[in-house]
Image (spheres, rainbow, N blue to C red):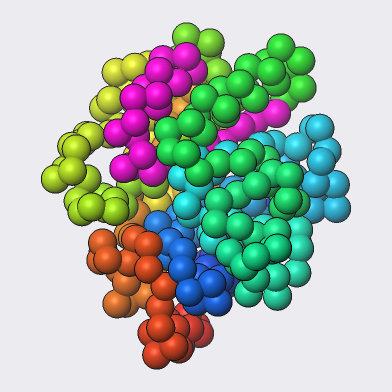
């Protein structure tokens, strides 16, 4: 299933956001801000770009996705549920004891999760390994890795960036969720990594910079990335933390906090479009 209609992708992304709010509210904990910011990215990947089949979740020929910013698991779980990997009702079990949907993704528990993540900075190294293996086997797999803009303060990210360029991993596409906020404040105030695009370019990446909450721009960027040979691509996706919920947008306090009942009801009303 590949959805090409932009308006339908927008509708699905809105459903993904509802699932994020439902998950975090039900758990009374979690990370809504950075999950909401990347909802459009995941929607485009899972409904428009990636070669995947929920009926064959372990198919060796499938494309792979690594959520390096693993605390944004509500976004991944909601996307997977909307894509048909498991019932959406299970989103209400997020972070509950015994649930398959733990605070960070677990590939051994949750269908559709390609890599267990949570320790920031490590996902790109794993994505490199998957991409390198695909190159050796010539199986045509594309690998996508989503990084946080706070996460790229980790030194291991830049070691992995050098490796990706050295190995000419043109089947690798890195996406940076550039919402400009991390747990302690603005990126430039905590440890300034701006301009992000220039850094990836200087290391040897093909770089595309887009509005990461614009479905059309995302589709076009991923399509361009497919055509690039001899180097990996980094899509710097400028997003809004808490996107879609008025009182959460661009508010660092919603990095890791669950809404109360009143806030939950308001958020769900705002998503009834």
Specify whether residue 168 is in view: yes
The residue drawn where x is 37% and y is 22% is 158
Q: Quadrant of the N terminus?
A: bottom right
At 76% from the left and 63% from the top, the residue drawn is: 86
Q: Tell me residue 104's x, y (percent).
A: 55, 51
Q: Position of residue 269 (x, y in %)?
A: 46, 88
Q: Is residue 144 magenta?
A: yes
**2, 99: nearer the viewer:** 99
Question: Residue 228, can we see it?
Answer: no
- For image coordinates 40% across by 83% down, the residue present is 260
Of the pair 86 and 54, the residue shown nearer to us: 86
Q: How many marks?
A: 0
Residue 32 x, y percent position in the rendering: 43, 65
Outermost left residue: 189
In this picture, is 229 found above or below 248?
Answer: above
Q: Examine the structure image and report whether residue 161 is included in the region drawn in magenta.
A: yes
Residue toward you, 6 or 174:
174
Picture residue at 29% right of the left edge, 18% below the top: 202
**Looking at the image, residue 214 lies above or below residue 261:** above
Direction top: furthest residue: 166
Horizontal side, residue 187 vs residue 263: left or right: left
Residue 157 in the image: state x and y as whole percent. Answer: 40, 27
The quarter holding residue 151 reads top left
Front residue of 50 and 57: 57
Question: Which of the 4 quarters of the picture holds residue 187?
Answer: top left
The segment highlighted magenta reads: 141-164
Q: Is 253 drawn above or below residue 60 in the view shown? A: below
Q: Is residue 199 left or right of residue 74?
A: left
């Amino acid at each position: 299933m590949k959805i090409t209609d932009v308006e339908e992708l927008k509708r699905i992304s809105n459903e993904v956001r509802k699932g994020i709010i439902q998950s975090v509210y039900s758990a009374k904990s979690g990370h809504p801000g950075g999950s909401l910011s990347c909802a459009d990215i995941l929607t485009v990947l899972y409904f428009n770009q990636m070669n995947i089949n929920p009926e064959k979740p372990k198919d060796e020929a499938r494309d792979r996705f690594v959520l390096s910013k693993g605390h944004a698991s509500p976004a991944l779980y909601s996307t997977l549920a909307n894509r048909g990997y498991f019932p959406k009702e299970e989103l209400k079990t997020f972070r509950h004891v015994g649930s398959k949907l733990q605070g960070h993704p677990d590939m051994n528990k949750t269908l559709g999760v390609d890599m267990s993540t949570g320790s920031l900075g490590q996902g790109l190294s794993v994505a490199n390994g998957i991409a390198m293996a695909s190159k050796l086997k010539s199986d045509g797999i594309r690998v996508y890795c989503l990084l946080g803009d706070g996460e790229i303060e980790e030194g291991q990210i830049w070691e992995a960036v050098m490796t990706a360029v050295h190995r000419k991993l043109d089947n690798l596409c890195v996406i940076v969720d550039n919402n400009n906020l991390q747990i302690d404040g603005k990126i430039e105030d905590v440890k300034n990594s701006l301009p992000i695009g220039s850094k990836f370019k200087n290391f040897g990446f093909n770089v595309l910079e887009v509005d990461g909450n614009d479905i059309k721009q995302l589709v076009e960027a991923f399509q361009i990335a497919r055509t690039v040979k001899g180097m990996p691509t980094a899509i710097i996706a400028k997003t809004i933390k808490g996107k879609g919920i008025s009182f959460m947008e661009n508010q660092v306090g919603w990095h890791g906090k669950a809404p109360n009942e009143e806030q939950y009801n308001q958020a769900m009303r705002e998503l009834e479009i």
